[in-house]
Protein backbone atom coordinates (compact mmCIF):
# COMPACT_ATOMS: atom_id res chain seq x y z
CA UNK A 1 0.00 0.00 0.00
CA UNK A 2 1.29 3.40 -0.94
CA UNK A 3 1.01 6.60 1.08
CA UNK A 4 -0.22 9.86 -0.38
CA UNK A 5 0.22 13.18 1.37
CA UNK A 6 -1.66 16.02 -0.36
CA UNK A 7 -0.44 19.48 0.56
CA UNK A 8 -2.89 21.94 2.07
CA UNK A 9 -2.96 25.49 0.70
CA UNK A 10 -4.94 27.49 3.22
CA UNK A 11 -6.34 30.83 2.10
CA UNK A 12 -6.46 32.31 5.58
CA UNK A 13 -4.00 34.95 6.74
CA UNK A 14 -1.78 34.98 9.78
CA UNK A 15 -3.23 37.27 12.46
CA UNK A 16 0.15 38.76 13.39
CA UNK A 17 1.78 39.34 9.99
CA UNK A 18 -1.26 39.64 7.74
CA UNK A 19 0.37 37.30 5.21
CA UNK A 20 -1.13 34.06 3.91
CA UNK A 21 -0.35 30.95 5.90
CA UNK A 22 2.29 28.75 4.27
CA UNK A 23 1.56 25.42 2.59
CA UNK A 24 1.11 22.72 5.20
CA UNK A 25 1.72 18.99 4.69
CA UNK A 26 -1.45 16.90 4.81
CA UNK A 27 -2.22 13.71 6.65
CA UNK A 28 -0.92 10.60 4.87
CA UNK A 29 -3.58 8.50 3.14
CA UNK A 30 -3.11 4.76 2.90
CA UNK A 31 -4.02 3.67 -0.63
CA UNK A 32 -4.07 0.43 -2.55
CA UNK A 33 -3.38 0.09 -6.27
CA UNK A 34 -5.80 -2.21 -8.08
CA UNK A 35 -5.05 -3.06 -11.72
CA UNK A 36 -7.75 -4.99 -13.60
CA UNK A 37 -7.79 -6.37 -17.14
CA UNK A 38 -11.31 -6.14 -18.62
CA UNK A 39 -12.58 -8.80 -21.01
CA UNK A 40 -15.97 -9.55 -22.51
CA UNK A 41 -17.81 -12.87 -22.20
CA UNK A 42 -15.81 -14.29 -25.12
CA UNK A 43 -12.50 -13.41 -23.46
CA UNK A 44 -11.69 -10.53 -25.83
CA UNK A 45 -9.67 -7.68 -24.30
CA UNK A 46 -11.74 -4.53 -23.72
CA UNK A 47 -9.49 -2.35 -21.60
CA UNK A 48 -7.48 -1.93 -18.45
CA UNK A 49 -8.47 -0.12 -15.27
CA UNK A 50 -6.01 1.26 -12.77
CA UNK A 51 -7.72 2.22 -9.51
CA UNK A 52 -6.45 3.83 -6.33
CA UNK A 53 -8.65 2.90 -3.38
CA UNK A 54 -8.57 2.89 0.39
CA UNK A 55 -10.33 -0.49 0.57
CA UNK A 56 -8.32 -3.00 2.65
CA UNK A 57 -6.40 -5.92 1.15
CA UNK A 58 -9.00 -8.33 2.52
CA UNK A 59 -11.22 -7.52 -0.46
CA UNK A 60 -10.36 -9.26 -3.72
CA UNK A 61 -9.24 -6.98 -6.58
CA UNK A 62 -11.95 -8.27 -8.94
CA UNK A 63 -14.57 -7.50 -6.32
CA UNK A 64 -13.24 -3.95 -5.84
CA UNK A 65 -13.27 -3.45 -9.62
CA UNK A 66 -16.90 -4.64 -9.75
CA UNK A 67 -17.82 -2.13 -7.05
CA UNK A 68 -16.20 0.67 -9.04
CA UNK A 69 -17.94 -0.53 -12.21
CA UNK A 70 -21.35 -0.25 -10.53
CA UNK A 71 -20.43 3.07 -8.96
CA UNK A 72 -19.34 4.39 -12.36
CA UNK A 73 -22.61 3.16 -13.90
CA UNK A 74 -24.66 4.92 -11.22
CA UNK A 75 -22.64 8.14 -11.60
CA UNK A 76 -23.09 8.01 -15.39
CA UNK A 77 -26.85 7.52 -14.96
CA UNK A 78 -27.12 10.45 -12.55
CA UNK A 79 -25.03 12.66 -14.83
CA UNK A 80 -27.32 11.76 -17.71
CA UNK A 81 -30.42 12.60 -15.65
CA UNK A 82 -28.99 15.89 -14.44
CA UNK A 83 -27.60 17.30 -17.65
CA UNK A 84 -29.17 15.84 -20.76
CA UNK A 85 -32.59 17.35 -21.00
CA UNK A 86 -34.21 16.08 -17.81
CA UNK A 87 -32.71 18.59 -15.35
CA UNK A 88 -33.61 16.49 -12.30
CA UNK A 89 -32.31 19.13 -9.91
CA UNK A 90 -34.88 21.62 -11.24
CA UNK A 91 -37.93 19.41 -10.76
CA UNK A 92 -40.54 21.05 -8.56
CA UNK A 93 -42.75 18.07 -7.78
CA UNK A 94 -44.75 18.34 -4.57
CA UNK A 95 -45.33 14.66 -3.78
CA UNK A 96 -43.12 11.61 -3.64
CA UNK A 97 -45.43 9.84 -6.10
CA UNK A 98 -44.97 12.60 -8.68
CA UNK A 99 -41.18 12.43 -8.31
CA UNK A 100 -41.30 8.63 -8.64
CA UNK A 101 -43.42 8.76 -11.82
CA UNK A 102 -41.16 11.36 -13.40
CA UNK A 103 -38.04 9.44 -12.38
CA UNK A 104 -39.45 6.22 -13.88
CA UNK A 105 -40.18 7.96 -17.20
CA UNK A 106 -36.70 9.53 -17.25
CA UNK A 107 -35.14 6.14 -16.41
CA UNK A 108 -37.02 4.44 -19.25
CA UNK A 109 -35.76 7.12 -21.63
CA UNK A 110 -32.18 6.51 -20.43
CA UNK A 111 -32.53 2.76 -20.95
CA UNK A 112 -33.92 3.34 -24.45
CA UNK A 113 -31.00 5.62 -25.29
CA UNK A 114 -28.43 3.12 -23.98
CA UNK A 115 -30.02 0.29 -25.99
CA UNK A 116 -30.06 2.47 -29.12
CA UNK A 117 -26.45 3.45 -28.53
CA UNK A 118 -25.24 -0.15 -28.27
CA UNK A 119 -27.20 -1.66 -31.16
CA UNK A 120 -25.32 -1.71 -34.47
CA UNK A 121 -27.91 -2.65 -37.14
CA UNK A 122 -28.40 -0.24 -40.07
CA UNK A 123 -31.83 1.05 -38.98
CA UNK A 124 -30.49 1.84 -35.54
CA UNK A 125 -27.47 3.71 -36.89
CA UNK A 126 -29.75 5.91 -39.03
CA UNK A 127 -32.10 6.52 -36.08
CA UNK A 128 -29.17 7.45 -33.84
CA UNK A 129 -27.87 9.94 -36.38
CA UNK A 130 -31.32 11.53 -36.76
CA UNK A 131 -31.89 11.78 -33.01
CA UNK A 132 -28.42 13.23 -32.48
CA UNK A 133 -29.01 15.84 -35.21
CA UNK A 134 -32.29 16.81 -33.54
CA UNK A 135 -30.43 17.49 -30.28
CA UNK A 136 -28.25 20.14 -31.91
CA UNK A 137 -25.22 18.91 -29.98
CA UNK A 138 -21.94 18.54 -31.80
CA UNK A 139 -19.96 15.33 -31.51
CA UNK A 140 -16.23 14.86 -31.86
CA UNK A 141 -15.16 13.71 -35.31
CA UNK A 142 -15.17 9.94 -35.62
CA UNK A 143 -17.00 9.37 -32.31
CA UNK A 144 -20.33 7.65 -32.04
CA UNK A 145 -23.23 9.65 -30.72
CA UNK A 146 -23.07 10.34 -27.00
CA UNK A 147 -25.81 9.34 -24.58
CA UNK A 148 -26.52 12.96 -23.53
CA UNK A 149 -26.96 13.99 -27.18
CA UNK A 150 -29.25 11.03 -27.85
CA UNK A 151 -31.32 11.72 -24.73
CA UNK A 152 -31.70 15.41 -25.59
CA UNK A 153 -32.62 14.52 -29.20
CA UNK A 154 -35.11 11.90 -28.02
CA UNK A 155 -36.80 14.50 -25.84
CA UNK A 156 -37.12 16.86 -28.81
CA UNK A 157 -38.40 14.04 -31.03
CA UNK A 158 -41.06 12.96 -28.53
CA UNK A 159 -42.21 16.54 -27.92
CA UNK A 160 -42.45 17.09 -31.70
CA UNK A 161 -44.46 13.90 -32.21
CA UNK A 162 -46.81 14.92 -29.37
CA UNK A 163 -47.30 18.33 -30.95
CA UNK A 164 -48.01 16.83 -34.38
CA UNK A 165 -50.51 14.39 -32.89
CA UNK A 166 -52.60 17.25 -31.46
Image (cartoon, rainbow, N blue to C red):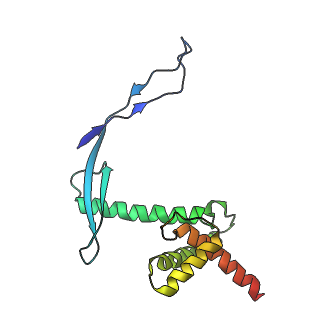
Residue with the most extreme top position: 16
Q: Residue at x 66, y 79 (%)?
A: 157
How many marks are shown on the rendered structure?
Answer: 0
- When asked about the image quadrant of residue 83, the answer is bottom right
Residue sitting farthest toward the front = 141
What residue is rendered at 55% in x and 15% in y? 15
Q: Position of residue 154 (x, y in %)?
A: 61, 76
Check the image and report above or below for 24 versus 151.
Answer: above
Horizontal placement of 149 versus 8: left or right?
right
Q: Quadrant of the N terminus?
A: top left
Residue 16 image point, x, y percent: 54, 11
Q: Quadrant of the C terminus?
A: bottom right
Residue drawn 30% across the image and 54% down it: 50
Say whether residue 61 is left or right of residue 136: left
Is residue 75 or residue 98 the one in the foreground? 75
Left or right, 159 with reference to 104 = right
Residue 101 appears anywhere in the view: no
Q: Is residue 35 above or below residue 106?
A: above
Locate residue 150, reporting x and y percent: 57, 72
Q: Quadrant of residue 118?
A: bottom left
Say which of 11 and 101 sits in front. 11
Residue 89 in the image: state x and y as whole percent: 62, 60
Q: Is residue 63 visible?
A: yes
The residue at the point 70 percent across, 78 percent down is 159
* Along the viewing direction, whichever of 154 and 2 lies nearer the viewer: 154
Position of 163 relative to 139 (above/below) = below
Q: Is residue 105 above or below residue 91?
A: below
Amino acid sequence: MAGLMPASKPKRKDKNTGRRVKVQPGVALTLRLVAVRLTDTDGNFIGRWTLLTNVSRESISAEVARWYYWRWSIDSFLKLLKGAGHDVEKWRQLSAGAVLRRLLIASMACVLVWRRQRSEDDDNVAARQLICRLSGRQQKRGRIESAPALLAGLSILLNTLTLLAE
